[in-house]
Image (cartoon, rainbow, N blue to C red):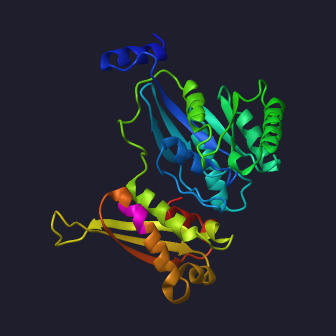
């Protein structure tokens, strides 16, 4: 019996439709190609941090799309790039490991930026993957007019024909910001999934541990409006999430203690701000998202520390979770 037939039998006994599909899709692309924003739009809720700064995703975030006929597990990866540090190489390795395990790949290419060497670098890496359907997702269509979008779609199609024997499996324009063709992207990706029962319980939106989600929300708040070099130099580690002792059941409070690591004292000053104003603002913004995530009030205790050149230090990378 083939693997698919075995799955169909299992579905029949559990009451799932015979044509139910479920599987994993990895969204890849160069940094700041719109992968995290698209993940959130497809899921319908925030599961990945977004930022105007490149290279903000450091973990593979699984966002889960639930439909009556299918379940789609979206794996959002760090942006593939030519690495300049040990951290950069580890992020690329993380992407490569992820791609080897998924059922299809969504290659994000922004509509408002011409195809460049970075896109070709990624396309050639994807072409080396045997029997993996690659769907080109032309993101950020809300930032261009019709003529520019048509030109980019032609350029993306040409890239597919140049790099892949049969071109891209599909080319879909999409805007996560205004919702243009988000449902179509879901349809196209689901059509590439194998027959399978659901992989996660109904209603579950991500399998990321709460501590990782909390750390990502804090990183997002800390990255707003700062200098270009900071995203690469900021690491967030949640030390503990514990209930406040002595609180009644109807008035709970969680103590969330977090360390923010940067590489230089000048970066520490940026994060803290004059008189600690910026760090307080980071805490206020992050706390809203954390309370929504954890479903209860939290006391957020943030500390900024220096870990000199941690991106190039193997021991410190391990300590910071990379």
Is residue 83 shown above or below 299? above
Q: Can residue 253 be seen by looking at this rendering?
A: yes
Tell whether 111 sits left or right of 87. right
Q: Nearer the viewer, residue 176 or 236?
A: 176
Residue located 34% across and 58% down the image: 294
Quadrant of the rendering where the C terminus is positioned: bottom right
- Tell me how many marks there are: 0
Tell whether 152 sits left or right of 177. right
Q: Quadrant of residue 228?
A: bottom right
Q: Can residue 140 be seen by looking at this rendering?
A: no
Q: Residue at the front extreme?
A: 146
Tell whether 320 sits left or right of 35. left
Residue 96: percent from left, percent from top: 63, 43
Residue 164: percent from left, percent from top: 78, 29
Q: Which residues are magenta?
A: 287-291
Is residue 321 shown above or below 76? below
Is residue 244 shown above or below 12? below
Q: Main secondary structure of the magenta part?
A: helix
Q: Nearer the viewer, residue 144 or 170?
A: 144
Q: Quadrant of residue 87?
A: bottom right
Residue located 61% across and 79% down the image: 267
Residue located 78% across and 41% down the image: 146
Residue 43: percent from left, percent from top: 49, 42
Q: Is residue 289 magenta?
A: yes
Is residue 153 shown above or below 81? above
Tell whether 198 sits left or right of 163. left
Quadrant of the rendering where the N terminus is positioned: top left
Q: Nearer the viewer, residue 148 or 2?
A: 148
């Amino acid at each position: 019996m083939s693997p698919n037939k075995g799955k169909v039998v299992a579905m029949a006994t559990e009451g799932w439709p015979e044509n139910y599909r479920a599987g994993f899709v990895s969204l890849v692309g160069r940094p700041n190609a719109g992968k995290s924003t698209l993940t959130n739009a497809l899921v319908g809720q925030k599961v990945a941090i977004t930022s105007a700064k490149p290279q903000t995703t450091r973990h593979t975030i699984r966002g889960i799309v639930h439909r009556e006929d299918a379940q789609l597990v979206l794996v959002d990866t760090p942006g593939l790039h030519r690495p300049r540090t040990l951290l950069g190489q580890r992020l690329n390795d993380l992407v490569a490991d992820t791609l080897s395990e998924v059922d299809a790949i969504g290659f994000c290419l922004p509509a408002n930026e011409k195809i460049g060497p970075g896109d070709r670098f990624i396309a050639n890496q994807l072409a080396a993957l045997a029997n993996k359907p690659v769907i080109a997702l032309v993101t950020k269509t809300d930032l261009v007019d019709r003529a520019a979008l048509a030109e980019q779609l032609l350029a993306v199609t040409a890239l597919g024909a140049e790099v892949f024997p049969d071109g891209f499996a599909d080319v879909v324009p999409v805007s996560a910001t205004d919702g243009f063709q988000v449902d179509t992207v879901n349809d196209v990706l689901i059509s590439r999934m194998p027959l399978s029962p659901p992989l996660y319980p109904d209603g579950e939106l991500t399998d990321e541990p709460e501590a990782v989600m909390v750390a990502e929300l804090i990183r997002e708040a800390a990255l707003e409006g700062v200098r270009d070099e900071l995203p690469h130099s900021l690491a967030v580690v949640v030390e503990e999430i514990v209930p406040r002792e002595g609180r009644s059941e109807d008035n709970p409070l969680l103590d969330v203690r977090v360390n923010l690591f940067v590489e230089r004292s000048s970066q520490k000053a940026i994060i803290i701000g004059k008189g600690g104003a910026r760090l307080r603002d980071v805490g206020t913004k992050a706390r809203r998202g954390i309370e929504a995530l954890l479903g209860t009030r939290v006391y957020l205790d943030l500390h900024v520390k220096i870990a000199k050149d941690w991106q190039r230090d193997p021991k410190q990378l391990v300590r910071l979770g990379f």
